[in-house]
Image (cartoon, rainbow, N blue to C red):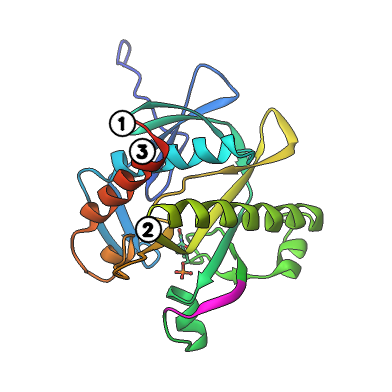
């Protein structure tokens, strides 16, 4: 068994990304995969350019958020499908912000799709693939010790700030930010600091064209609307025009 090349293993593999160690113990390499899943992994597909598109979109958004004062895990883009990120302990709470009724909100309430809310709705879910990311509330989060009440205040404030910034950004490129999911993590190098982590891409946002109402996000895959990557490419093109980038 000697002299066999060591096969590198990711330290984490999710449905759409892998995380790899780097030489620096405070950073990781985050790789965007081409795999797409929906309905808690029940529906699966692979799209040739998804990793590249989501990496480019997420990189543009994270750089922008950093420039307007939102602390994130982003360090730099490495190549088409990889970024370097600060190492964090992910909070097991997903923060969802909704501006317009869609998706599970409609399913849960019977409200029709497309109703603009008077104020954004913030929702939390327990990050557990096994349980299908169930909806939870502040009391669950406290008792499950997923985050402290103080952390939760911070998560809410950050999510609302990100919503304002990104709703404005997407509006400038003719897109309505309907809803999105954020994840946060505690810096490995300083656990008192919580930063925005994971990715922001059409996989985890609903984006509707302001003129035509067309869906420009993963709902195209969930609902078999076709032209999934064409929509992601269009989102990237518009963001590049507004924010720059090669
Ligand atoms: P939902 O309507 O299915 O609850 O989704 C709300 C938003 O959160 C939508 O933009 C998709 C995103 N989301 C994820 O990114 N990952 C998930 O696991 C879920 C359930 C939603």
Asked if residue 207 shows in the view, the reply is yes
Which quarter of the image is occupied by the C terminus? top left
Instruction: Assess whether mark 2 and mark 3 are in contact (beta carbons under 8 angstroms).
Output: no
Crowding around mark 2 (Cα neighbors within 10 Å: few <14, some 14 to 19, many 20+) is some
Residue furthest out toward the top: 3
Q: Which mark is residue 80?
A: 1
Instruction: Assess whether mark 1 and mark 3 are in contact (beta carbons under 8 angstroms).
Output: yes
Q: Which mark is residue 122?
A: none
Where does label 3 land, which residue?
Answer: 56
Which quarter of the image is occupied by the N terminus? top left
* Stretch in magenta: 114-119
Instruction: Please state if 47 lies on the left or on the right of 166 as rendered.
Output: left
Q: Residue 174 carries which label?
A: 2
- CA gap between label 3 and label 1 equals 7 Å
User: The residue tagged with tag 2: helix, strand or loop?
Assistant: loop
Instruction: Assess whether mark 1 and mark 2 are in contact (beta carbons under 8 angstroms).
Output: no
- CA gap between label 3 and label 2 equals 19 Å
Crowding around mark 3 (Cα neighbors within 10 Å: few <14, some 14 to 19, many 20+) is many
| Of the pair 147 and 101, the residue shown nearer to us | 101
User: The residue tagged with tag 1: helix, strand or loop?
Assistant: loop
Lower sequence index among marks 3 and 2: 3
The tally of labels here is 3
Residue 116 lies within the magenta run: yes
| Of the pair 131 and 107, the residue shown nearer to us | 107
Predominant SS along the magenta part: strand
Q: Where is residue 72 in the image (x, y as percent from the top left)?
A: 59, 38
Q: For residue 26, which quarter of the picture?
A: top right
| Of the pair 15 and 185, the residue shown nearer to us | 185
Q: Can you tell which of label 2 and label 1 is closer to the viewer? A: 2
Q: Residue at 31%, 16% (x, y): give it.
A: 5
Q: Where is residue 111 in the image (x, y as percent from the top left)?
A: 48, 87
């Amino acid at each position: 068994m000697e002299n066999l090349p060591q096969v590198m293993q990711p330290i984490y593999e999710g449905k759409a990304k892998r995380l790899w160690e780097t030489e620096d113990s405070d950073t990781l390499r985050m790789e965007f995969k081409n795999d797409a899943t929906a309905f808690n992994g029940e529906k699966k597909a692979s799209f040739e350019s998804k990793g590249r598109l989501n990496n480019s979109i997420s990189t543009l958004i994270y750089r922008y958020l950093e420039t307007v004062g939102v602390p994130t895990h982003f360090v730099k883009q490495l190549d088409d499908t990889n970024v370097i990120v600060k190492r964090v302990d992910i909070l097991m709470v997903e923060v969802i912000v909704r501006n317009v009724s869609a998706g599970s909100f409609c399913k849960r309430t019977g409200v029709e799709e497309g109703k603009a809310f008077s104020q954004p709705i913030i929702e939390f879910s327990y990050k557990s693939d096994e349980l299908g990311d169930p909806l939870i509330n502040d009391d669950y989060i406290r008792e499950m010790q997923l985050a402290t009440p103080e952390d939760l205040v911070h998560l809410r404030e950050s999510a609302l700030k990100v919503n304002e910034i990104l709703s404005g950004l997407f509006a400038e490129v003719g897109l309505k930010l309907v809803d999105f999911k954020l994840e946060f993590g505690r810096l490995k190098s300083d656990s008192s600091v919580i930063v925005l982590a994971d990715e922001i891409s059409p996989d985890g946002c609903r984006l509707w064209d302001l003129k035509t109402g067309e869906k420009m996000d993963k709902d195209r895959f969930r609902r078999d609307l076709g032209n999934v990557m064409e929509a992601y490419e269009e989102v990237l093109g518009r963001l590049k025009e507004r924010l720059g980038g090669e």
